[in-house]
């Protein structure tokens, strides 16, 4: 976990490939379904969180990289977006959280974890999701050649990880927006191949 935090911290000291200065297009395509109290897990510099706050959501942006949160706070002040709060914290500790949300977005956090911490993270998402909460998650897919960036995730892995407590509504192939000034061949032309997961929190009736 320390090495993961160091990698993110080092990335934000420069300009991370995923920090494109605007909301991810794959989120915009399903924006009408995202509402209410919203958690942006791994919010980075805040573009996605601010976009949904401007659409009327009450947003909590969570990240453990202070330099990214500082940029997010500055953006929300500059753009006069009051309905977003920025929280410093570890997404692997959501299993102990009293927070509850109507919607959750994840732009590239899930695919950063190795398998065991990924299980802990998914359990934390279950914990903070209200009944009917919609999770919208973007992750690199196995169609993206190995090399730069995070773990590649298969559709089967998504279905396995979100089999308990979630109803999967859609898993769609999309592109992950990245900076246009990256060296040629850094990722696939047009942006890394990715999945967009839409999953609805459900609780099984007690016997």
Image (cartoon, rainbow, N blue to C red):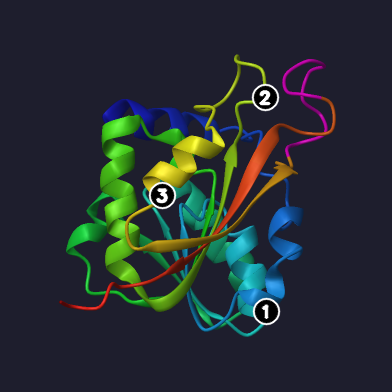
Earlier in the chain: of badge 2 and badge 3, it is 3
Dot 2 falls on a residue whose secondary structure is loop
Which mark sits nearer the N-terminus, 1 or 2? 1
Question: Is 87 left or right of 82, judged from the image as shown?
Answer: left
Magenta stretch mostly in which secondary structure?
loop
Q: Which residue is identified by label 1? A: 54
Viewer-side residue, 65 vs 139: 139
Stretch in magenta = 178-188
Residue 32: give x, y in percent of width and height. Answer: 70, 77
Q: Is residue 114 magenta?
A: no
Q: Residue, x 64% and y 35% (percent of image)?
A: 15
**Residue 50 position in % (x across, y down):** 62, 69
Q: Which residue is located at x 68 percent, y 80 percent? A: 55
Residue 130: percent from the left, percent from the top?
A: 36, 77
Numbered badge on residue 144: 2
User: Viewer-nearest of labels 2 and 3?
Assistant: 2
Q: Quadrant of residue 31?
A: bottom right
Residue 153 is left or right of residue 115, and the answer is right
- Residue 66's label in the rendered image is 3
Viewer-closest of 98 and 152: 152
| Horizontal side of residue 34 vs 38, given as left or right | right
Q: Residues within 10 Å of mark 2 (few under 14, many from 20)?
A: some
User: What crowding class fits label 1: few (fewer than 14 Cα within 10 Å), some (14-19), or many (20 or more)?
Assistant: some
- Residue 161 is drawn in which quadrant? top left
Q: Nearer the viewer, mark 1 or mark 3?
A: 1
Nearer the observer, 171 or 89: 171
What is the number of the mark on residue 93?
Answer: none
């Amino acid at each position: 976990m320390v090495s993961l935090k160091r990698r993110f911290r080092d990335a934000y000291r420069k300009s991370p490939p995923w920090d494109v200065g605007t909301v991810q297009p794959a989120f915009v395509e399903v924006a009408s379904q995202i509402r209410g109290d919203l958690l942006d897990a791994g919010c980075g510099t805040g573009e996605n969180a601010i976009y949904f706050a401007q659409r009327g959501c009450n947003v909590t942006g969570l990240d453990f990289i202070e330099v990214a949160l500082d940029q997010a706070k500055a953006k929300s002040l500059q753009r006069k977006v009051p309905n977003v709060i920025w929280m410093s914290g570890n997404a692997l500790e959501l299993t102990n959280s009293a927070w509850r949300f109507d919607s959750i977005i994840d732009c590239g956090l899930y695919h950063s974890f190795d398998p065991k911490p990924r299980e802990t993270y998914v359990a934390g998402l279950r914990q903070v999701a209200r009944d009917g909460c919609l999770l919208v998650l973007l992750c690199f897919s196995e169609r993206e050649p190995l090399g730069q960036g995070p773990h590649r995730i298969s559709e089967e892995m998504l279905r396995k990880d979100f089999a308990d407590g979630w109803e999967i509504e859609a898993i769609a192939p999309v592109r992950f927006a990245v900076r246009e000034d990256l060296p040629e061949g850094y990722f696939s032309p047009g942006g890394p191949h990715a999945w967009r997961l839409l999953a609805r929190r459900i609780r099984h009736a007690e016997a």
